[in-house]
Amino acid sequence: MHRKKGMCLSQVMVISMLVRTCLSDDRINRGSFPKGFVFGTASSAFQYEGAVKEDGRGPSIWDTFANSSGKIIDGSNADVAVDQYHRYN
């Protein structure tokens, strides 16, 4: 099976519609998207938890990668992240 490089026409049309909507004075709402459009989100523990050295937590593969010299341009890591570990009640 060959994978197509680039975007398909439907993706280009959705992006074009979103750009037009964002540049107009109208607000974006559910009706701004084609019928059947599926919204999605994603996250990871690495982005949220922080607490890299709390309660016996060991380093993950991403902790090791992000803390390796020269791997992240600005030298940042997720040792604190959004610190959900300490914010959870």
Image (spheres, helix red, strand yellow):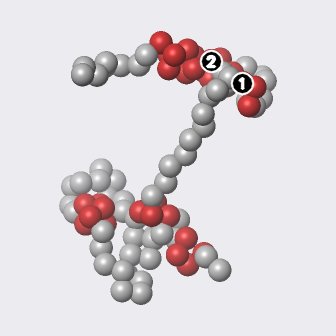
Q: Is residue 44 above or below residue 37?
A: below
In which quadrant of the rendered view does residue 69 lie? Answer: bottom left
What percent of the width, then of the height, locates residue 32? 72, 24
* Residue at the outermost bottom position: 55
Q: Is residue 29 above or below residue 65?
A: above
Question: Which of 82/75 is in front?
Answer: 82
Quarter of the image where the C terminus is located: bottom right
Question: Which of 75/50 is in front?
Answer: 50
Q: Are marks 1 and 2 in contact (CB under 8 Å)?
A: yes
| 27 left or right, relative to 18 | right
What percent of the width, then of the height, locates residue 49? 48, 69
Q: Residue at x 25, y 61 (%)?
A: 65
For mark 2, what is the residue? 17
Q: Residue at x 44, y 76 (%)?
A: 51
Q: Earlier in the sequence, mark 1 or mark 2?
A: 2
**Type of residue at label 2?**
Met
**Type of residue at label 1?**
Ser
Label placed on residue 32:
1
Question: Which of 67/12 is in front?
Answer: 12
Per the image, label 2 sits on a secondary structure element best described as helix
Quarter of the image where the N terminus is located: top left
Q: CA distance from mark 1 to mark 2?
A: 8 Å
